[in-house]
Amino acid sequence: KKLMKIPVSTKNAPSAIGPYSQAIEHKGLLYLSGQIALAPGESSIENSDANQQIDKVFTNIESILVEAGGSLNDILKLNIYLTNLENFDLVNKRMEEIFEQPYPARATLEVSSLPKGAIVEIDAIAKCD
């Protein structure tokens, strides 16, 4: 039985910087690759401010979800990677502003580094109807 993987891609989010898709749809779920604070068409992160990077990451995630016909509120699970857990409260504050309850399930990890010098990366699993 063939696995049906449907790629989702938009020019409104940064292109993949490696051999992966922005997102893959499979059986009503959308698996989003990790997003960092790259602007579409850019090859480096312009801003080192944590709040601005967090905002850009969620903007990139939202752009991919919109391309798939969804929204941020379709997210079921987030994995958040921070180079400094001191930014944990900033992520919480932003999530309270952009998500409705019930909030997505999530895991938050501190990592030693991220691609392109990012300070935050987020991947997601969302439902797509």
Image (spheres, rainbow, N blue to C red):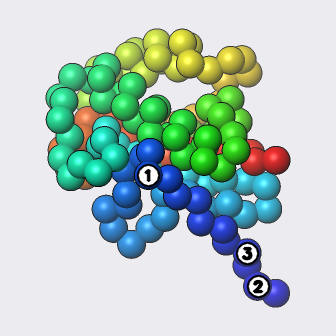
The reply to whether residue 79 is in sight is: no
Q: Is residue 84 above or below residue 27?
A: above
Relative to the observer, which residue lies in front, 6 or 120?
6
Residue for badge 3: 4
Q: Quadrant of the N terminus?
A: bottom right
Dot 3 alpha-carbon crowd within 10 angstroms: few under 14, some 14 to 19, many 20 or more:
few
Counting from the top left corner in percent of width and height, residue 85 is at: 32, 26
SS of the residue under disc 2: loop
Residue for badge 1: 11
> Tags 3 and 2 in contact by the CB under 8 Å rule?
yes
For image coordinates 56% across by 13% down, the residue present is: 96
Does label 2 or label 1 sit earlier along the sequence? 2
The amino acid at mark 3 is Met
The reply to whether residue 48 is in sight is: yes
The amino acid at mark 2 is Lys
Residue 88 occupies quadrant: top left
Does label 1 or label 3 sit earlier along the sequence? 3
Q: How far is mark 2 from mark 1, CA to CA?
A: 28 Å
Residue for badge 2: 2
Q: Is residue 47 above or below residue 116?
A: above
Q: Which of marks 1 and 3 is in front?
A: 1
For image coordinates 62% across by 32% down, the residue present is: 72
Residue 48 occupies quadrant: top left
Dot 2 alpha-carbon crowd within 10 angstroms: few under 14, some 14 to 19, many 20 or more:
few
Q: How far is mark 3 from mark 2, CA to CA?
A: 6 Å
Relative to the observer, which residue lies in front, 78 or 72?
72
